[in-house]
Image (tube, rainbow, N blue to C red):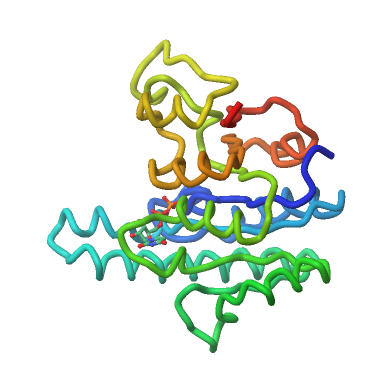
Amino acid sequence: MKYKRIMLKLSGEAFLGDRAAGIDPEFTLKIAKQIKEVYDMGTELCIVIGGGNIFRGLSAAEHGLGRTTGDYIGMLATVMNSLALQESLEKIGLEVRVQTALTIIEVAEPYIRRKAVNHIKRGRIVIFGAGSGNPYVTTDMAAVLRALEMDCEVIFKATKVDGVYDKDPAKHEGAVKYDRLKHDEVLINNLKVMDPSAIALARENETPIIVFDINKPGNITKAILGENIGTIVTHL
Ligand code: UDP
């Protein structure tokens, strides 16, 4: 195993399945099974989930809703996704705690770093909901922040694309995929990996990011084993 403790950042879209919006429990179960595979290998897992399948503050702001309110709604959407994944993981026998950056104690623990570390030590998976608790950023930033706080060695950014391209591969035939990139190259060339603020924080702390396609079963395991499955962003 190349990595022992990881931050898995799942985009909300990974929960869509064939739906236009919302959560498809069949998909959360599929992802849960991939997670179990690496958990059983001894991987310690911290997870941050986006909310894009339900709500994004920026898109709502474009349609007249205040950005701050939109962002808080977006953060609440990530809590819904966190609860859905928690249930799928528990269904297959894993112990999970959801901790949220906005307190909703009826459904989840509040985020307390020392407690989260303790959960991991006891063999539990911790899902961090409600992003960072602050508007004007996204769950990419939350993933980097929590990865640093939790001493994760790497961030696995699981999306629906199989890596980072020079142009959007959905729009441009002949878009070229990168195997390796430096944080600096991502920022200078404005490549779509994560939010620039999240990349900058990862660069400052030399945190590697691996971008890969979550829809290919076995990909999380391959990434844990150090196989080249997408694009790796490092400071070297
Ligand atoms: N959000 C926020 N602060 C955070 C994390 C998330 O305001 O720390 C809001 C923001 O509006 C964002 C939405 O929650 O658009 C959903 O998160 P994100 O867009 O990162 O989801 P993803 O694209 O990964 O599904």
From the viewer's perspective, tell me whether residue 80 is left or right of residue 65: right
Above or below, 41 against 174 in this view is below
The N terminus: image quadrant: top right
Where is residue 144 shown, x and y percent of the image? 53, 51
Numbered circles on residues, count: 0
- Of residue 217 and residue 95, the one placed in the foreground of this image is 95
Residue at image position (70%, 41%) is 220
Locate the C terminus and report the quarter of the image it occupies: top right
Q: Residue furthest bottom?
A: 106
Q: Residue at x 37, y 21 (%)?
A: 167
- 106 w.r.t. 23: above or below: below
Q: Residue at image x 47%, y 14%?
A: 176
Q: Residue furthest left?
A: 64
Residue extending furthest front?
204
Q: Quadrant of ligand 1?
A: bottom left
| Percent coordinates x, y for residue 197 in the rendering | 39, 46
Q: Position of residue 77 (x, y in %)?
A: 42, 67
Q: Residue at x 34, y 23 (%)?
A: 171
Quarter-of-image position of residue 36: bottom right
- Residue 10 drawn at (x, y percent): 55, 50
Give 171 or 177, whichever is nearer the viewer: 177
For residue 23, side relative to residue 224 (left or right): left
Q: Residue furthest top?
A: 174
